[in-house]
Image: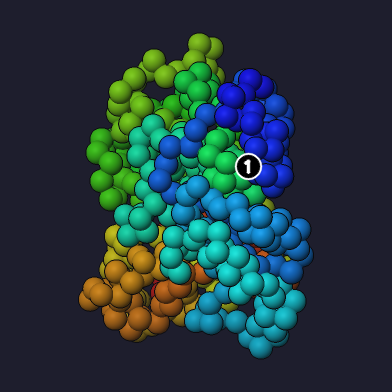
């Protein structure tokens, strides 16, 4: 790797031993991917994936403390993934005991480290840091040092920023030194599509299901998607962005997609069109039958496949303000249709703290609460990591949550039916 004189000086220790270690780590990371140089991070804020104070993460806390003790500050303030705990989310005595005494025992300690290192504010905890309410929305072309997969794919695809799928800790190291290795999705060539996906469904495809199908097929490659704009439009409005948020999270978790292009919709596709498609790109056609096949092949890992669900999570990644309103209206309508007043399965809708703050100022908040639904800033993945929770029959409309936990996936409409007694 070729370093500039300034970068070489840091590597050689001009800013101290700790900064030199950070620089050497990034150089080794870049070497692994044959990066020829480092490029400056240009975004105002960073986003960190590591938000949870698990006891077993002692090496992370030690590393953070070394950085703090050396007085090496992050060049950026940052947001971070959601907190793992919320007393409002249903959990019995034993589950809470495991959470508090055996799992997230270092949560307060770690949050104190994050504050000292440069956390944007006390509510900067969400996997959807790019929501307008959260204040960490990168601009087109900005170079980032993020690691959260659902945020990376959104930033690259919907916002047109540039970021590789980094690992945890690498994200903060890039922020500290101000550089990231130049390879992959930072390069023009790396952003070209090696798959052409043609959506030929007879109705609007479920975002999480369509994203799952594409992720499972293309894995870490870049897809260029035709035919989706007929269902979600050619404008990046609130509805389209919410759809692409959920779609992208599924491509990133069911595969390893870090960037997708939607014909006539995402910024680079609008600007460059089919010039983004690499020579020899493979083709994947998705119709109704293909989506049905994908969903039918999801494994059911509940001990009793016929068990009655005990909990429902909606919002992984976190919901937008408009999605919270939309779910409120849909739940009310289904409850009325089925002749019940409250949801029949404990249901948790998750969103960023500042999105929830905005939602709670609307009339919808009281209506959703009256329907028996809980809102929370929690990370459902972190909740399901509890061994006493993962044995529960939990349902979700998130393909990310399904992929990483024992939760069982259902479409939004199937979820609505289940929680409002439509399935009896």
Q: Residue at x 46, y 80 (%)?
A: 344
* Closest to the observer, 381 or 212: 381
Circle 1 SS class:
loop
* Residue 193 to residue 89: above or below: above
- Could you tell me if residue 75 is visible in this image? yes
Hey, which quadrant is residue 303 in on the image? bottom right
Hey, which quadrant is residue 181 in on the image? top right
Task: Look at mark 1 in the image and give the residue it sits on.
Answer: 15
Give how far across and how far down residue 139 sits, in percent.
Answer: 35, 39
Q: Residue at x 43, y 37 (%)?
A: 42
* Residue 314 to residue 144: above or below: below
Give how far across and how far down residue 313 sits, in percent.
Answer: 51, 67
Asked if residue 408 lies left or right of residue 398, the reply is right
* Residue 42 to residue 81: above or below: above
Asked if residue 130 lies left or right of residue 76, the reply is left
**Residue, far top:** 279
* Closest to the observer, 320 or 126: 126
* Residue 284 to residue 84: above or below: above
* Closest to the observer, 276 or 263: 276
Q: Residue at x 39, y 52 (%)?
A: 136
Give how far across and how far down residue 197 sits, in percent.
Answer: 46, 28
* Closest to the observer, 190 or 195: 190
């Amino acid at each position: 790797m070729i370093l500039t004189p300034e970068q070489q000086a840091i590597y050689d220790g001009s800013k101290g031993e700790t900064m030199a270690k950070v620089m050497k780590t990034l150089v080794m990371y870049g070497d692994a991917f044959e990066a020829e140089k480092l490029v400056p991070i240009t975004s105002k804020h960073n986003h960190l994936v590591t938000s949870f104070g698990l006891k077993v993460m002692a090496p992370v806390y030690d590393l953070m403390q070394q950085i703090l003790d050396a007085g090496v500050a992050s060049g950026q303030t940052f947001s971070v993934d959601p907190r793992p705990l919320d007393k409002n989310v249903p959990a019995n005595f034993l589950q809470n005991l495991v959470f508090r005494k055996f799992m997230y025992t270092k949560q307060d300690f770690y949050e104190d480290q994050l504050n000292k290192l440069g956390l944007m504010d006390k509510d900067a905890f969400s996997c959807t840091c790019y929501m307008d309410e959260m204040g960490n929305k990168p601009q087109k072309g900005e170079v980032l040092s993020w690691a959260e997969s659902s945020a990376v794919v959104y930033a690259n695809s919907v916002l047109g920023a540039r970021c590789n799928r980094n690992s945890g800790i690498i994200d903060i190291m890039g922020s500290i030194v101000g550089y990231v290795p130049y390879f992959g999705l930072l390069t023009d060539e790396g952003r070209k599509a090696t798959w052409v996906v043609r959506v030929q469904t007879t109705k609007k495809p479920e975002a999480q299901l369509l994203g799952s199908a594409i992720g499972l097929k293309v894995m870490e490659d870049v897809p260029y998607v035709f035919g989706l704009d007929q269902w979600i439009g050619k404008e990046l409005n609130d509805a389209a962005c919410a759809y692409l948020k959920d779609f992208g999270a599924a491509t990133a978790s069911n595969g390893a997609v870090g960037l997708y292009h939607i014909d006539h919709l995402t910024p680079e596709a609008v600007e460059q069109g089919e010039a983004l498609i690499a020579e020899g790109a493979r083709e994947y056609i998705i119709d109704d039958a293909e989506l049905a096949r994908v969903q039918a092949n999801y494994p059911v890992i509940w001990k009793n496949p016929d068990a009655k669900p005990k909990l429902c999570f909606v919002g992984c990644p976190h919901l937008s303000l408009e999605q919270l309103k939309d779910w409120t209206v849909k739940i009310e309508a289904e409850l009325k249709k089925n002749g019940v007043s409250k949801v029949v399965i404990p249901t948790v809708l998750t969103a960023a703290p500042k999105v929830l703050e905005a939602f709670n100022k609307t009339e919808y908040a009281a209506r959703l609460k009256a329907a028996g639904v809980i809102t929370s800033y929690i990370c459902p993945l972190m909740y399901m990591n509890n061994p006493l929770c993962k044995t529960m029959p939990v349902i979700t409309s998130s393909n990310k949550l399904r992929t990483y936990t024992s939760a069982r996936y259902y479409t939004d409409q199937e979820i609505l039916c289940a929680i409002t007694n439509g399935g009896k």
